[in-house]
Image: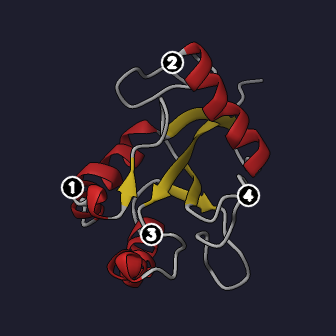
Amino acid sequence: MNTEYQLAQFNVARMIGVTIEDPIMREFVDNSDQVNLLAEGSEGFVWRFEDESNNSIGFNPFNDDQVITNLSVWKDIETLESFTYKTFHTEFIKRRKEWFQKYGKAHYVLWWVKKNQFPTLSEAIEKLEHLQNHGPTAEAFTFRTKFPKP
């Protein structure tokens, strides 16, 4: 039996603002719904971690009010890469220094998950730590150093 896989993505950012309500974060926050809707409507989008109010910013798995996270699943690397670098989302990447500080050795991680099995925040944190400690491997990698589906 051939198992199908999808791509999980976890992104962590340390805000310049003290909290998400800090005025310096306003433009980022005001546009986050638009970016999320764009992601959800993009080819290859499967799922994203969110609360009942359709928000992923409120989760604080690191117990740090300056850290925000984003966890999502995509059909494959190509569709996530297209959303990340070829849509309105790119404008936020270009401007990230206006809102965010440098975050450790790695601020995002990619890994393969079985189709219809969605990752938890704990699993995502483990994958990011694996990448930070071991560099890119088939278990946890980046756009720059990709690994094929298992």
Asked which secondary structure carries label 3, the reply is: loop
Q: Characterize the local packing of mark 2: few (<14), some (14-19) or many (20 or more) Cα atoms within 10 angstroms.
A: some
Inspect this view and state whether residue 2 appears: yes
The three-letter amino acid code for the residue at tag 1 is Lys
* Residue 48 in which image quadrant: bottom right
Q: In the image, which is nearer the foreground, mark 3 or mark 1? A: 3
Q: Is label 4 in a helix, a strand or a loop?
A: loop
* Residue 77: % across, % down: 43, 37
Q: Contact, CB < 8 Å: mark 1 with mark 2?
A: no
Residue, disc 2:
136
Label 2, label 3: how far apart the Cα atoms are: 30 Å
Q: Which residue is mark 3?
A: 17
Q: Which mark is residue 94?
A: 1
Distance, label 4 to label 3, CA atoms, is: 16 Å
Identified at 73% across, 58% down, the residue is 63
Gap between marks 2 and 4 measured at Cα: 26 Å
For the residues labelled 3 and 1, the Cα–Cα distance comes to: 18 Å
In the depicted view, which residue is nearer to us: 138 or 65? Answer: 65
Q: For marks 1 and 2, give the CA distance.
A: 24 Å
